[in-house]
Amino acid sequence: MAKQILIVEDVSFLQKAMKVILKDAGYDVLIASNGEDGLNKAIKKHPDLILLDILMPKMDGMTMLKELRKDSWGKNAPVIILTNLNDKEKLIEATKEHVVDYYVKSDWEIDEIVKIVDDKLK
């Protein structure tokens, strides 16, 4: 059975690009466009890995992450932050919530997402 990835990202072209690339690599992909939807899908579906943006409508990524950590399953759910924020305070905040990794979007190419995911799931 394919590993399931939840992409929580509000930028539609980036969301779609990651979905296509990860599906082509054999992953089952779920999509959420905001933190509220992402939190609901994560708690309901228990994906193997969550790719989480920080700046989003309805509920930002850090709030979603903190809410996720309150759930019995979610407290240990693997989360990778993918953001445009190169902010030391956000990195420290994310580290306190035990994220697997923190990537600034401008520091990597979209086609590297499979390697990032593969490395974290092995």
Image (cartoon, helix red, strand yellow):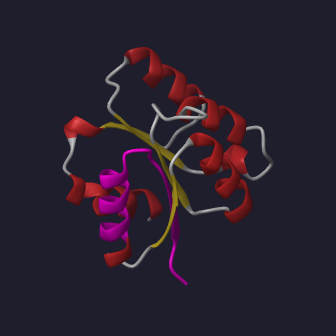
From the viewer's side, name the closer residue of 87 and 54. Answer: 54
User: Residue 119: x, y in percent?
Assistant: 37, 59
Outermost right residue = 72
User: With respect to residue 96, does 111 lie above or below?
Assistant: below
User: Residue 102: x, y in percent?
Assistant: 40, 37
Part of the protein shown in magenta: 1-22
Residue at 31%, 52% (x, y): give it: 14
User: With respect to residue 9, does 17 lie above or below?
Assistant: below
State the quadrant of the C terminus: bottom left
Q: Is residue 54 left or right of residue 110?
A: right
User: With respect to residue 51, does 94 lie above or below?
Assistant: above
Q: Is residue 107 left or right of residue 56?
A: left
User: Residue 115: x, y in percent?
Assistant: 29, 61
Answer with the quarter of the image where residue 16 lies. bottom left
86 inside magenta stretch:
no
7 inside magenta stretch:
yes
From the viewer's side, name the closer residue of 111 and 118. Answer: 111
Answer with the quarter of the image where residue 48 lies. bottom right
State the quadrant of the N terminus: bottom right
Residue at 58%, 26% (x, y): give it: 96
User: Residue 61: x, y in percent?
Assistant: 54, 35
